[in-house]
Image (cartoon, helix red, strand yellow):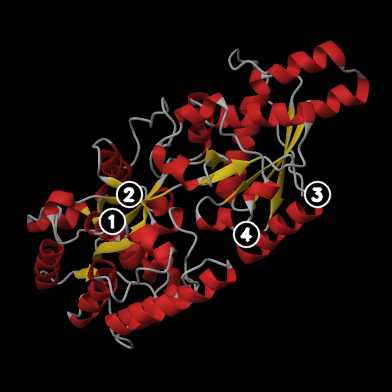
């Protein structure tokens, strides 16, 4: 589906577009018009459409005569199938938005996408994103939106009321939980309702910075089938922490039926103090609970050692150019990606959506009035060595049943050690499907 947009009146001077020069000098009629038109496929979430339309409008405003037409596709598995089918049949849009990390690798970029490795904007990409879109030495995309952190959203008013400090170790986190429970407040919000089982994974997936701090080669060895969660104590710790929370009785009583929105409301109201979550929840908290949004802060999942405390980072999705986009249109597509990965592109996105984290582009800044949780997240990026990409951005191997497994651990149905071994078997299926040796 192609979306209609209101065109901006102003024309802003800025990025030079070589394609326009070529079109003006050598093309005429329909061919020139076609060379200056891009179709841009994104998923149909409200946020993605808003970001895409903002980028399209701002790029058009900088480049008179250019027309970027935003198309939408379904989300989830249906959307994955649309992307893969259109790539395989040569019917893909001129540029498209899709996941970075392990799911990008499943598109077989060497055969379906145009590398952007030599494009000037690549030098401005932060390593976290560049790594998430690099396969076999080639870079493939520009970042769509902001990075996110996986850790703990917490109620700062509860912390202030009880005189607590942000924990740097797991033992300190559990001590805070004990004090919070003593005060009659739910220490850890868990939401395993039908629409929210995915939230159960955060204590495991968000713990990867701690895994990498203790086992720096884990991702490489995991990919090769040489390391496993069950036999690597640092990797199994996430499952064990989930078990500890349940055994201590620190969850909300309705954890089995509570949904994601329930969790956000409990956090914002102070009924619950901690909610393991991605910071992508912050804009929704701001929208749904504007008077309490500044009461919500964020910290990384603590591990065993305060000296290595740091953040697990989710890279944003990427915008890619398929090999079917050729000639002058390919040059225009590359210019569009260069605009996306520029301060002007970041500003265009900020105009329509509150950032959920930092942009991974040099020179991009966040507004001074970003929510407290995003300010907390940003602080981890300001110190070397305090951020690590989530495992799914540094390895193609990711099991598909983790959320079912973590729900069982968090519900007291399955032990942490058994769950880690079961996840190893879950991931083995995917690794074998991908033809990865060692599994």
Between discs 1 and 3, the one toward the N terminus:
3
* Residue 42 drawn above or below residue 406: above
Establish if 107 lies above or below 332.
below
State the residue position of label 4. Answer: 75
Residue 349's spot in the image, x, y percent?
A: 52, 35
Residue 251 visible within the image: no
Mark 4 or 2 closer to N-term? 4
Cα distance between the residues tagged 1 and 3: 40 Å
Residue 436: mark in rendering: none
In the rendered structure, find residue 91 and report the number of the disc placed on it: 3
Q: Helix, strand or loop at disc 3?
A: loop
| Above-or-below relation of 365 to 208 | above
SS of the residue under disc 1 = helix
Which image quadrant for residue 336?
top right
Q: Residue at x 47, y 27 (%)?
A: 123
**Residue 419 screen position, x and y as percent:** 34, 81
**What SS does tag 4 mark?**
loop
Q: Nearer the viewer, mark 3 or mark 4?
A: 3
Callout 2 touching callout 1 (CB < 8 Å): yes
- In space, the residues marked 4 and 1 are separated at their CA atoms by 31 Å
Question: Mark 1 — residue?
Answer: 212
Q: Label 2: which residue?
A: 388
């Amino acid at each position: 589906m192609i979306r209609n947009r209101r065109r901006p009146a102003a024309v802003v001077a800025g990025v030079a577009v070589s394609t326009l020069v070529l079109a003006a000098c050598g093309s005429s009629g329909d061919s020139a018009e076609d060379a200056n038109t891009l179709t841009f496929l994104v998923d149909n979430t409200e946020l993605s459409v808003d970001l895409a339309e903002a980028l399209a409008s701002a790029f058009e405003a900088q480049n008179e005569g250019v027309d970027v037409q935003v198309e939408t596709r379904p989300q989830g598995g249906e959307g994955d199938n649309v992307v893969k089918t259109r790539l395989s049949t040569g019917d893909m849009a001129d540029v498209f938005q899709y996941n970075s990390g392990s799911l990008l690798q499943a598109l077989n970029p060497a055969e379906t996408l145009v590398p952007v490795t030599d494009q000037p904007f690549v030098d401005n990409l932060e390593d976290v994103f560049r790594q998430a879109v690099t396969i076999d030495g080639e870079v493939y995309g520009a970042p769509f939106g902001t990075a996110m952190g996986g850790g703990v959203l917490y109620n700062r008013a509860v912390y202030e009321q009880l005189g607590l400090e942000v924990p740097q170790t797991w033992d300190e986190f559990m001590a805070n939980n004990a004090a919070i429970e003593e005060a009659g407040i739910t220490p850890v919000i868990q939401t395993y309702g039908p629409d929210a089982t995915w939230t159960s994974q955060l204590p495991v997936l968000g713990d990867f910075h701690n895994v990498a701090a203790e086992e720096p080669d884990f991702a490489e060895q995991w990919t090769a089938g040489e390391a496993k969660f069950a036999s690597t104590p640092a990797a199994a710790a996430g499952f064990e922490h989930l078990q500890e929370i349940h055994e201590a009785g620190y969850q909300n009583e309705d954890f089995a039926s509570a949904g994601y929105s329930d969790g956000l409301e409990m956090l914002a109201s102070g009924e619950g103090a901690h909610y393991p979550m991605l910071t992508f929840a912050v804009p929704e908290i701001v929208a749904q609970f504007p008077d309490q949004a500044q009461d919500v802060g964020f910290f990384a999942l603590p591990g065993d050692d305060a000296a290595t405390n740091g953040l697990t980072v989710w890279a944003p999705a990427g915008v890619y150019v398929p090999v079917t986009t050729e000639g002058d249109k390919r040059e225009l597509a590359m210019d569009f990606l260069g605009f996306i990965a520029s301060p002007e592109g970041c500003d265009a996105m900020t105009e329509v959506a509150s950032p959920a984290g930092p942009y991974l582009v040099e020179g991009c800044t966040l507004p001074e009035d970003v929510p407290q949780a995003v300010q907390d997240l940003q602080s981890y990026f300001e110190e070397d060595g305090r951020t690590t990409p989530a495992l799914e951005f540094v390895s193609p191997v990711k099991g598909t049943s983790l959320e079912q497994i973590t729900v069982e651990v968090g519900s007291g149905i399955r032990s942490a050690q058994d769950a880690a071994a079961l996840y190893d078997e879950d991931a083995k299926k995917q690794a074998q499907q991908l033809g990865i040796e060692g599994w």
